[in-house]
Image (tube, rainbow, N blue to C red):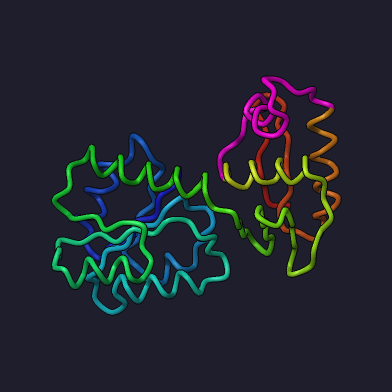
Amino acid sequence: MRIAYIDDSIENLEVMELALADDFEIKTFSCEDKFLNQDLSTFSAIILDIHMPGKGGFELYNDILSSDNYSGNPIFFISSDETDEIVVRSFQLGAVDFIPRRISLVELKARIQSRIEFHSKHKTIIEFDGLKLNLSQLSVSLHGKLVKITFTELKLLNHILRSYPEISPKDEIAKSVWGKDYALDGTIYTHISNLNTKLKGWNYEVVAERMKGISLKKR
């Protein structure tokens, strides 16, 4: 799981990086603009310091929501300011959680992990670089145009997008898509080829790495 943490304090950045490095891939930013220039869809979660000079965490939150490459992944606010006004505003804006600075390391990791997993399991609309997967309507669109894919292809695409940027082992794909412990390589590769053909206008493609699994990569 890849986490982005934005804070104007270098000391806070170093402490957070050290605290989470064993469980997450964490990328820290002291500059808001540099962070916004990243592909935000590659982060499993985003943690924002609230009080920063210039653009504070609340303003940065709104910039993230308006970004074309934000995919809806969980956003946390963190602060030593635990006044009711700050905490309530954090949740009113739509953050999944407010993290106090004095939180224990065990609780911090548990909160981040649980929020990411809940979001991944329950979101019904996935948007990624112009591709929109709507599970409630069982539809896929690319740059606003509907794409006709089979239900099996929909399940395969759903699993790969939820796992991105990590590689999905083939046995994991088989359970998620076909409900079995194993699926023939030929079956998997055929569906991958069909998906890539139908999504040829997309900047990404589904790639099968024989010894590793299935992943999503830029064309």
What percent of the width, then of the height, locates residue 105? 21, 40
The answer to if 172 sits in the magenta stretch is yes
40 relative position to 97: left or right: right
| Extreme residue toward the bottom, this view | 54
The answer to whether 123 appears left or right of 146 in the picture is left
Q: Quadrant of the N terminus?
A: top left
Quarter-of-image position of residue 146: bottom right
Query: Between 157 and 169, which is closer to the camera in this rendering?
Result: 157
Residue 17 locus on image (x, y percent)? 29, 46
Q: Position of residue 68 (x, y in %)?
A: 57, 70
Q: Residue at x 13, y 51 (%)?
A: 102
The residue lying furthest to the top in this view is 181
Q: Is residue 53 above or below residue 78?
A: below
Of residue 116 and residue 213, the one placed in the foreground of this image is: 116
In the figure, 116 relative to 30: above or below? above
Residue at the spot 65% in from the left edge and 27% down from the top edge: 175
Closest to the observer: 52 or 87? Answer: 87
Magenta span of residues: 165-186
Q: Which residue sits at x=60%, y=36%? A: 167
Q: What residue do we see at 44% from left, 45% from top?
A: 118
In the figure, residue 71 lies in which quadrant? bottom right
Residue 68, above or below 42: below
- Determine if the magenta segment contains residue 168: yes
